[in-house]
Structure formats: C-alpha cells, structure tokens
Image (spheres, rainbow, N blue to C red):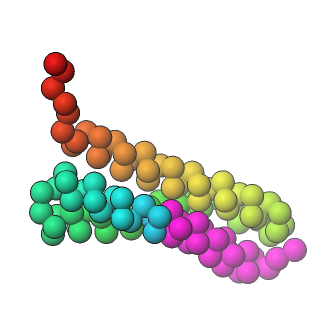
Amino acid sequence: MLTPIAALLLTYALTALLATLAAVSLWRPLSLLLGEICGTEQRSRFWTVWSTVMMVVAPMLIVSMGNIATDPTWLVKSTVAGALTGILFALIGMGFAVWSRSPRRADA
C-alpha cells in the first residue's frame, strides 16, 4: 500500500509523462499543419503551444477529478485510463478545430 501523498505524486507523475509523450510526438506535425491553416508563423506558434498545453492540462484535470487509490495496481490502472481519456478528449477537440478550419476541395 502506498501512502496517500505518494499515490497522489505517482498519479500526477505518470499522467504528466503520458501527456508529455503525446504532446511531444504531435508537436512537429501539428506545427506544420497549423502553419498552413493560420497563415502566419506567430499565429501558428501560438496555437501550437496552446494545443500542447491543453493536451497536458486535460489529462491532469481528468485524473484530478477521480479518487486516488493507494493500491499500486488500481492506482496505475485508473491513472492510465484517466490520462488516456484526457488525451483523447484533447485530441478530439483539436481534431474538430483543425477539421472545421481546413480548406475543402471543390467537388469536380
């Protein structure tokens, strides 16, 4: 059994690790895509940073809303599930925002 504070710290560390891995892996493709959509480098940089922050904050928020387990197995399971749910929500939001602003091909 973990102490409550150790469980909390482990939860946040694991969530931050998963969210940061997702954000880092999407940084370059997202930056290039937003560069095409936004038109200027400054806008593209702002929205890339904003999206990256949201990809880290959303999982932290989801994990923070749940109870912290002191059983190591349950802690890891619930933390990974919450973190991946937060990452998924962030990606769905970003995907919708990019999709809705992407130019469409004219049907021939």
Question: Who is closer to the viewer here, 15 or 30?
Answer: 30
Q: Quick check: 65 above or below 17?
A: above
Q: Position of residue 39 (x, y in %)?
A: 12, 57
Read off the magenta span: 1-22
Question: Who is closer to the viewer here, 83 or 40?
Answer: 40
Question: Who is closer to the viewer here, 98 or 105?
Answer: 105
Count of picture labels:
0
Q: Quick check: 70 above or below 35?
A: below
| Left/right of residue 60 with respect to residue 6 in the rendered view | left
Q: Residue furthest front?
A: 108
| Left/right of residue 55 with respect to residue 104 in the rendered view | right
Q: Residue at x 18, y 21 (%)?
A: 107
Q: Residue at x 12, y 63 (%)?
A: 40
Residue 7 lies in the magenta stretch: yes
Q: Decide whether the magenta segment is chiefly helix, strand or loop.
A: helix
| Left/right of residue 5 with respect to residue 13 in the rendered view | right
Q: Quadrant of the N terminus?
A: bottom right
Q: Quadrant of residue 72?
A: bottom right
Q: Residue at x 67, y 59 (%)?
A: 80
| Left/right of residue 63 with respect to residue 105 in the rendered view | right
Res. 50 in view: no
Q: Residue furthest right?
A: 1
Q: Residue furthest left?
A: 40
Q: Residue at x 74, y 64 (%)?
A: 76
Q: Quadrant of the C terminus?
A: top left
Residue 40 lies in the magenta stretch: no
Q: Quadrant of residue 46?
A: bottom left
Q: Position of residue 105 (x, y in %)?
A: 19, 30
Res. 33 in view: yes
Question: Who is closer to the viewer here, 7 or 50?
Answer: 50
Q: Quadrant of residue 96?
A: top left
